[in-house]
Image (tube, rainbow, N blue to C red):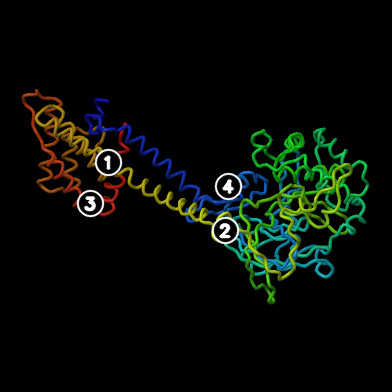
Amino acid sequence: RDSQQAAGPSHDASGGRLARGLSIGAAALAVTVLVPLAIPGFNVGAFPQGAKVNLWGTATGLNPVVTLGNDLRNPTGYGQITYATDSPDALYLRAVTLEDFDGQRWEPDQRYGLREPGVENMGTDEVRASIDTGVVTTTRITTNSFTSPWLLAPYAPVGFSNLSGRWSWDPLNLSVIATDNGSTAQQQYDVRSAEPELSREVLEDIGPVPEGAVDAQFLALPDTTPGIIRDTAAELTDDIANPYQQALAIQNYLRGPAFTYSVDAPVDGGYDGNSLDVVARFLESRSGYCVHYAGAMAVMARLAGIPSRVAVGYAPGDATGGSVQGPDGLELTEFTVTSQDAHAWPELYFDGVGWVKFEPTPSRGVVPDYAQTAFAPGSPVPNTDDLTPGGNPPLEPGTPVDPPMGADGQPAGEADPDRARETSALITAALVVAALLLIVPFLLRTLRSRNRRRKFNAAVGSRGAATLAWAEATDLAADYGHPALPTDTPRTFATRLAASTRIDDAAATALARLSCAYETEEYAHPDHLVHAGWEDIESVVRSLRERSSRTVRFRARWLPRSLSNDS
């Protein structure tokens, strides 16, 4: 410690260790804020899908591994997506389906080898036949900051237009994914979708799925399926032969009075997730959110022999009250969705019509017309109004829609002042962090210098003053890129510094006086002390500044090297 002090670094009581600690903290904060900006894909949720850190707004995304709980528990909702459609029914925006279930989690199967390029015209023969015989919908989607490699679209898409980037689609589930590391962010595109005309009568006439009609993975379940899941599925479906009636029995059981919707209960109860064990705990506790309801119905459907998968995307959201003109002059009714509309729902396969959406989550989404008229055997007849939140009838094309009103009496589709304040607060916080990262080293160095000068003035004429002055001189030299070497004596350092920097004669004399004062204070008798003044420090730093480049002066002031030399 004494040898290091002799070499020049300061070890007075000016807070060197505190300065070093604060500098490390500032650097850690900088890494925390800035590194995610340079690494693509980190998000709200799990790598590699979802929201990236965005200091100028909120980027959002949907995690296909169904960790939707954090989004749903956000009290404000973020990442507004706008869509406009001519669909008379409530529209779900689907991103991807999860069909690969190993008992621990539902996952999407990428099937890169089976994907087909280009999405201007897409879809299987079965789906494209629905263009002539089924319901055809045109939807314009504005993604804003929604960031995901999967493309949002109503099911089943048969063509996209005005879409940037390169995309491919999966014939087994019609999911669309970017093939060039692209993203959905800041896109506005039109999608045409088609599906068969579905009704209770159509679905009731369909028998069990023939063997081999769909890939075996849509029926696969591990042998470790808990007993409560098997027993519940058997109790609901064993006495029913018709697949459609079995599906309704499962849906209406989960939507029945015994179950409640909650985003907090699974966390509090320790069963938040989508594994088989979580489904079992959910059936015991009978409280959860869309992930639990969709997963439970998909698993019980497979136990009943009905192929199933879980779709991930957004529930219909809220009407804005506005409309836009779509392709060929179509009038499209406008809606918005946020992270709070993130949703998961089951899709079940019926031979001849394909994949059919169900809605087992109470108080979320909208139950399709074809699923509202039946009920599970032994269960009370469900109230249709309860199955359709708000009891809103389907919209007729071109019908004006009154926007929902917020608590402040303003239309809910208008700019949310709380969200605007939240965004403003985020920007302000980012700017404050950036300013602190720049100003903290400057403040620490200034405080150290002032503290030394105060102590120097108090000790003038006595032992200790020269040590303080010399510590300041060596730190100043380090700030301007000329640190003392471990082998330097005060005299050799002063000589080398004067020669290398070519400071003027007055500054060189002041530097020599400072080193001489330090030497006599360290090694001479108190009666023979040589005194130096603080004006000698000012003379040295003035000359160093005049002979340094603009970059060096900036670093010396805002990023002083002497702060990192503390030990």
Q: Residues within 10 Å of mark 4 (few under 14, many from 20)?
A: few
The amino acid sitting under disc 1 is Arg
Q: Which residue is mark 3?
A: 548
Query: 253 or 205: which is nearer to us?
Result: 253
Cα distance, mark 1 to mark 3? 19 Å
Query: 380 or 85: which is nearer to us?
Result: 380
Cα distance, mark 1 to mark 4? 43 Å
Q: Which is more N-terminal, label 4 or label 1?
A: 4
Q: Which is more N-terminal, label 3 or label 1?
A: 1
Q: Is residue 259 left or right of residue 488?
A: right
Q: Which residue is mark 4?
A: 75
The amino acid sitting under disc 4 is Pro
Q: Which residue is mark 1?
A: 445
Whether residue 255 can be seen here: yes
Position of the C terminus, as image quadrant, is top left
Q: Is residue 114 left or right of residue 214?
A: left
**Mark nearer the viewer, 3 or 2:** 2
Q: Give the image location of residue 139, x and y in percent.
A: 69, 66
**Mark nearer the viewer, 2 or 1:** 2
Residue 298 in which image quadrant = top right
Cα distance, mark 2 to mark 1? 54 Å
Q: Is residue 470 left or right of residue 405?
A: left
Question: Tag 4, which secondary structure?
Answer: loop
Q: Which is more N-terminal, label 3 or label 4?
A: 4
Q: Which residue is mark 2?
A: 409
> Would you say the residues marked 1 and 4 are in contact, meaning their CB atoms lie under 8 Å apart?
no
